[in-house]
């Protein structure tokens, strides 16, 4: 591969956001961005700006909700929370994702091992 | 449901733009703060920290733009933005906007008005249950009286009623005017006789009370006695919506009839254009019409018969079944061996889901022609607006160039310009709908006559509004796209460099538009000229009588109990007394009058002409009193009028029309010869009268034979009384009524003006002529505005050139003529194109020439006159800008550059 850092796969960002909110509870945008970067190590380079339209889309779908509140250092910040519909979606998508990555993994297995 | 939720949220987003922007700014700022704080902690300088944060973030503006697009609906937002901008532009050029919107409103209004009428009269289904199943039963006739006859005898209706293998229900109706007593005088009220199946078959529930059923349809009434149902309009108009209306009794034709129901406002029966107020059971007809009843007439064809096709019956089986019906139907009539032609007739059915209508027969063809004319008017209006837009394009070139230079894409600009056009056509159509609404009211008022109100629902309905919307969009695109493409052509740099030099191409386009406007306009003018002359020819021809100052009234003394000798004596005395009256120039009686009181036809032969035996031509028969020809001012060409010696005991005499004389006695005197009506009945010809137009104004030769009613007293039933008297209908009506009612107050007398009756039959020609002339003038006005605009622009463009010419010594007249000449040249070119198009149209639309009378569609005087008119008007439109040009101060004109 030419790039040693991978672009965030389309659609997977949503899954990561939902997962983050599910694990950590309410978070602001910066928090979510940090979390995604930390978990992925240095493999994924998130263009942090792309996060915000994605958050808006998730909110329009009704999977997350947002509220203005105060951050740790007492600044006004917008906090996102996963909704019940979001949790359902997360469960369905995770399962889907696991299945697909299993299949892909099987394809990519070195052929020598099976014979 | 998720996509719907997203859509709703985005729609909501349209209205929360400001909050969204503010929140987004704050949120992103917070993010950057957090990020740079983090960077600070890692030991960067504040400047470095901020820069790193921004880099990490990756483009604030792009994020915001994506966010905005996601937040709401970008397409709608752009549209709203374009509309706002468009409105601002239109407001800034009020003059342009007013002319454009008004042109379009007139064009779109004309189309909407005509379409509304077409929809109401032709396309709209009846407001009854399952209108699609309704059919009208017709007689299909061959031979002399070839064509469709839509009327039936009561016996034949009974016959159809028993054909349950074909129909699930059959009903009959006949429109009539009832004399209803309100106080002293009987008032004529539009009504209809309906058979018992009428209301159940139409399936419209009454507003109040009940409707009529078969139980009510009995001679002298059903279990509730004689009953009737009234219309909503009658209930409101006559009885002020009184809820105690049920069980009220009306005196109809002298007989008491109880009201048992009121129909809802939308119900008008099955005859489109009629609005009957009183629905009376068919079999009460003998009781009401007394001796003039038609119900038991073996050969009185008077009923409209409609039916619902049996459900589940295939179309082919239905047709076959109908075809098999005629011989059996024919059996119920006494055979006439000498009329074998009758056996070749048959029965047919046409869909009646849109109702039946004489009005439709009369007007559908003119309406379609008018629709075409209105379409052309709209095209001319479009050309006008396109021309105005082109002129404005010149002025806006700089604006467009600047916008392109700062990065607006061409599609985006095109969209903006077309949106402006659609805005114009949208405004035009709103105003147009208002015009159409007034126009329709006005047209209906024109259609209605003193004695007959035409009732059509012309309120705009979804169909009409849809049509208008479609027309608006089509026109907007038609006139908008061309100029928009032109405006956005070329690179920003060249447009900015050039000032107003690049105008030659534009003026060519403008000239083309004006030329095509003139061509289309001339097309309409020629059409209008033809229609106006048709109407003129129709109403100013010699009809064989003088319709002016003639007043007629059909009377039926049998209703007051006059019969036999008493009846004929009454007629004789009435004839005497009317002729003695000082203000009556001449009076007579006749069983028929031309046109409105037409006709009674019978086959005849000529004793002295063997060929006529096989020909068996049909003639109109008319039983008249002496003085009939004098009263009608019809010339007696040969022989004598009837007189008192032509009594029942004398040999039967007749007066024949000029056409009969010419056909059967060329070069010989027909006097003393005989015409034969049946084996034992022949009449000696004692006179020849000028042909009278009897059935319709357009008909050609007329075979007609007149007999003396006092010689054949049995022919005296209901008669028409006609008087020639100077003065108005207002003076003649009471005179006639007084004279008739001197015998009995029970005889209803409705006096009509004969010339009004004639005018009524030329109504469709009159309205076509008026509308065609109106649309033609509209087209001329629009074309002249276009021409004026183009010439004005040309003058402005040539200001410096004109200045040089004048400085070099050109006189005012020279300059004026130069401009006017250009206008004339444009108009003449248009005319050269328009005339062949008009000739081609006349060839292609073959039905067109049937609408004309007394001239051909390629009538040279009309075409020449209209072309000349067009060129003159063009010269006038060019004159005003020319005069302005001639008044230029050469010094100023030269400095202008």
Image (spheres, rainbow, N blue to C red):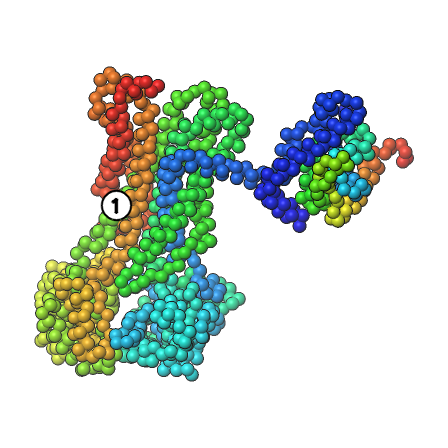
Whether residue B296 is visible, yes or no, is no
In this view of the protein, which residue sits in the foreground, B152 or B258?
A: B258
**Picture quadrant of residue B353:** bottom left
How dense is the environment of label 1, judged by Cα within 10 Å: few (below 14), some, or many (20 and up)? many
| Picture quadrant where residue B246 is located | bottom left
Q: Is residue B94 left or right of residue A10?
A: left
Q: Nearer the viewer, residue B718 or B421?
A: B421
Q: Is residue B646 above or below residue B425?
A: below
Name the outermost residue toward the front. A74
- Compared across the picture, whether B674 is left or right of B388 comes to left
Instruction: Determine the residue positioned at 26% across, 31% down.
Output: B880
Q: Quadrant of residue B584?
A: bottom left
Say whether residue B204 is left or right of residue B60: left
As drawn, the residue found furthest toward the top would be B808
Q: Is residue B278 above or below residue B104?
A: below
The answer to which of A62 and B786 lies nearer the viewer is A62
Q: Position of residue B304 (x, y in %)?
A: 37, 68
Residue B416 image point, x, y percent: 49, 34
Return the x and y of residue B73 as percentages of the image width and height.
59, 40
Q: Which residue is depicted at the point 54% across and 37% down?
A: B78
Q: Return the residue at label 1.
A: B529
Residue B834 % position (x, y): 31, 37
The residue at the point 64 percent across, 30 percent down is B62
Helix, strand or loop under label 1: helix
């Amino acid at each position: 591969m030419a790039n040693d850092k991978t672009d965030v796969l389309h659609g997977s960002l949503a899954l990561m956001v939902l997962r983050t909110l599910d694990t950590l509870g309410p978070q602001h945008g910066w928090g979510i961005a940090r979390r995604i970067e930390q978990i992925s190590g240095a493999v994924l380079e998130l263009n942090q700006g792309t996060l915000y339209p994605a958050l808006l889309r998730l909110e329009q779908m009704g999977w997350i909700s947002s509220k203005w509140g105060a951050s740790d250092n007492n600044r006004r910040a917008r906090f996102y929370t996963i909704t019940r519909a979001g949790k359902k979606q997360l469960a369905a998508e995770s399962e889907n994702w696991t299945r697909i990555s299993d299949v892909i993994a099987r394809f990519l297995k070195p052929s020598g091992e099976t014979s | 449901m998720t996509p719907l939720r997203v859509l709703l949220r985005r729609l909501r987003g349209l209205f929360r733009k400001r909050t969204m922007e503010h929140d987004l700014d704050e949120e992103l700022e917070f993010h950057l703060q957090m990020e740079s704080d983090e960077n600070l902690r890692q030991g960067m300088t504040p400047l470095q920290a901020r820069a790193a944060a921004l880099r990490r973030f990756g483009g604030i503006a792009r994020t915001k733009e994506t966010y905005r697009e996601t937040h709401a609906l970008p397409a709608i937002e752009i549209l709203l933005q374009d509309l706002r901008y468009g409105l601002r532009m239109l407001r800034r050029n009020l003059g342009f906007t007013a002319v454009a919107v008004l042109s379009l409103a007139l064009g779109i209004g004309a189309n909407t008005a005509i379409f509304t009428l077409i929809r109401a009269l032709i396309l709209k289904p009846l407001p009854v249950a399952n209108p699609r199943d309704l059919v009208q039963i017709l007689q299909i006739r061959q031979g002399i009286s070839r064509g469709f006859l839509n009327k039936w005898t009561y016996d034949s209706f009974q016959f159809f009623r028993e054909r349950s293998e074909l129909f699930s229900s059959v009903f009959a109706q006949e429109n009539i005017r009832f004399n209803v007593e309100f106080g002293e005088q009987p008032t004529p009220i539009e009504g209809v006789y309906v058979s018992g199946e009428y209301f159940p078959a139409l399936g419209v529930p009454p507003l109040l009370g009940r409707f009529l059923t078969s139980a009510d349809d009995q001679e002298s009434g059903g279990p509730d006695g004689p009953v009737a149902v009234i219309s909503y309009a009658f209930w409101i108009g006559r009885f002020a919506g009184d809820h105690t209306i049920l069980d009220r009794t009306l005196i109809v034709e002298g007989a008491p009839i109880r009201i048992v129901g009121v129909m809802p406002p939308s119900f008008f029966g099955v005859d489109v254009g009629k609005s009957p107020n009183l629905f009376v059971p068919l079999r009460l007809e003998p009781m009401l019409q007394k001796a003039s009843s038609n119900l038991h007439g073996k050969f009185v064809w008077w009923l409209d018969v409609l039916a619902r096709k049996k459900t589940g019956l295939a179309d082919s089986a239905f047709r076959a079944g109908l075809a098999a019906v005629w011989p059996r139907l024919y059996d119920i009539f006494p055979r006439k061996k000498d009329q074998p032609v009758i056996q070749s007739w048959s029965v047919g059915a046409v869909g009646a889901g849109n109702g039946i209508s004489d009005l439709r027969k009369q007007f559908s063809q003119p309406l379609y022609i008018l629709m075409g004319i209105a379409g052309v008017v709209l095209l001319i209006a479009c050309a006008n607006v396109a021309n105005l837009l082109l002129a404005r394009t010149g002025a806006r070139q700089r604006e467009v160039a600047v916008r392109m230079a700062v990065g607006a894409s061409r599609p985006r600009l095109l969209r903006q310009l077309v949106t402006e056009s659609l805005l114009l056509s949208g405004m035009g159509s709103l105003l147009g709908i208002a015009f159409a609404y007034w126009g329709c009211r006005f047209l209906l008022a024109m259609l209605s006559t003193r004695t007959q109100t035409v009732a059509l629902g012309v309120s705009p309905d979804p169909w009409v509004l849809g049509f208008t919307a479609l027309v608006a969009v089509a026109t907007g695109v038609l006139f908008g796209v061309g100029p928009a493409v032109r405006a956005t052509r070329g690179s920003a740099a060249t447009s900015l460099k050039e000032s107003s030099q690049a105008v030659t191409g534009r003026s060519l386009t403008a000239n083309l538009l004006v030329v095509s406007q003139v061509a289309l306009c001339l097309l309409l003018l020629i059409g209008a000229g033809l229609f106006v002359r048709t109407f003129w020819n129709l109403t100013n021809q010699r009809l064989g009588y003088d319709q002016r100052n003639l007043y007629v009234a059909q009377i039926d003394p049998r209703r007051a109990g006059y019969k036999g000798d008493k009846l004929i004596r009454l007629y004789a005395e009435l004839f005497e007394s009317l002729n003695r009256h000082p203000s009556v120039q001449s009076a007579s009686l006749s069983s028929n009058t031309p046109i409105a009181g037409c006709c009674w036809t019978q086959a005849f032969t000529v004793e002295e002409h063997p060929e006529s035996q096989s020909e068996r031509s049909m003639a109109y028969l008319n039983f008249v009193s002496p003085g009939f020809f004098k009263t009608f001012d019809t010339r007696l060409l040969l022989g004598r009028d009837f007189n008192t010696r032509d009594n029942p005991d004398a040999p039967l005499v007749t007066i024949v029309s000029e056409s009969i004389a010419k056909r059967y006695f060329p070069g010989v005197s027909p006097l003393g010869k005989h015409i034969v009506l049946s084996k034992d009945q022949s009449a000696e010809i004692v006179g020849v009268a000028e042909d009278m137009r009897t059935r319709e104004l357009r008909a050609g030769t007329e075979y007609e034979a007149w007999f003396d009613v006092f010689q054949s007293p049995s022919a005296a039933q209901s008669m028409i009384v006609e008087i020639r008297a100077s003065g108005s209908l207002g003076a003649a009506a009471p005179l006639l009524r007084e004279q008739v009612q001197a015998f009995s107050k029970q005889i209803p007398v409705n006096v009509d003006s004969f010339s009004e009756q004639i005018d009524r039959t030329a109504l469709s020609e009159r309205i076509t002529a008026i509308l065609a002339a109106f649309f033609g003038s509209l087209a001329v006005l629009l074309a002249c505005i276009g021409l004026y605009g183009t010439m004005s622009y040309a003058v402005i463009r040539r200001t410096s050139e004109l200045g040089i010419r004048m400085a070099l010594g050109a006189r005012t007249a020279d300059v004026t003529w130069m401009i006017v000449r250009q206008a004339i040249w444009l108009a003449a070119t248009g005319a050269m194109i328009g005339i062949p198009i008009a000739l081609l149209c006349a060839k292609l639309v073959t039905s067109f020439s049937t609408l004309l009378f007394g001239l051909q569609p390629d009538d040279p005087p009309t075409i020449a006159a209209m072309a000349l008119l067009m060129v003159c008007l063009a010269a006038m439109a060019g004159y005003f800008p020319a005069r302005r040009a001639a008044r230029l101060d050469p010094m100023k004109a030269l400095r202008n550059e």
